Amino acid sequence: MQTYLIAAYIIAWLAICLYLVILAMRIRGVRVELAAVEELVREQQQQEKEL
């Protein structure tokens, strides 16, 4: 019975770690998209100032 508990514990921690890795990748993607949007806004504001 103890081996099942150890296996369940290991599986639970692997699942948590996998979830955190996936979450970190998604956050990195959102940051990249946000930087692109910020750059587009800056460019648009510069164009409006030039007019």
Image (spheres, grey):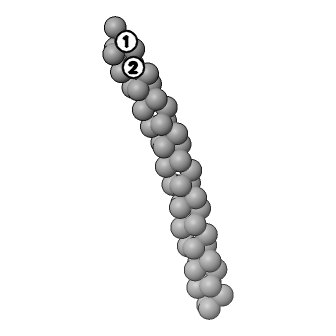
Mark 1 is surrounded, within 10 Å at the Cα level, by few (under 14), some (14 to 19) or many (20 or more) other residues, namely few
| Image coords of residue 13 (percent x, y) | 57, 73
Horizontal side, residue 9 vs residue 3: left or right: left
Above-or-below relation of 30 to 45: below
* SS at circle 2: helix
Q: Are marks 1 and 2 in contact (CB under 8 Å)?
A: yes
Q: Which residue appears at 54% of the width and 60% of the height?
A: 19
| Image coords of residue 34 (percent x, y) | 45, 37
Q: Which residue appears at 51% of the width and 54% of the height?
A: 23
Horizontal side, residue 22 vs residue 43: left or right: right
Above-or-below relation of 3 to 12: below
The residue indicated by pointer 2 is: 46
Q: Quadrant of the C terminus?
A: top left
Q: Nearer the viewer, residue 13 or 4?
A: 13
Above-or-below relation of 8 to 20: below
Horizontal side, residue 17 vs residue 31: left or right: right
The residue indicated by pointer 1 is: 50
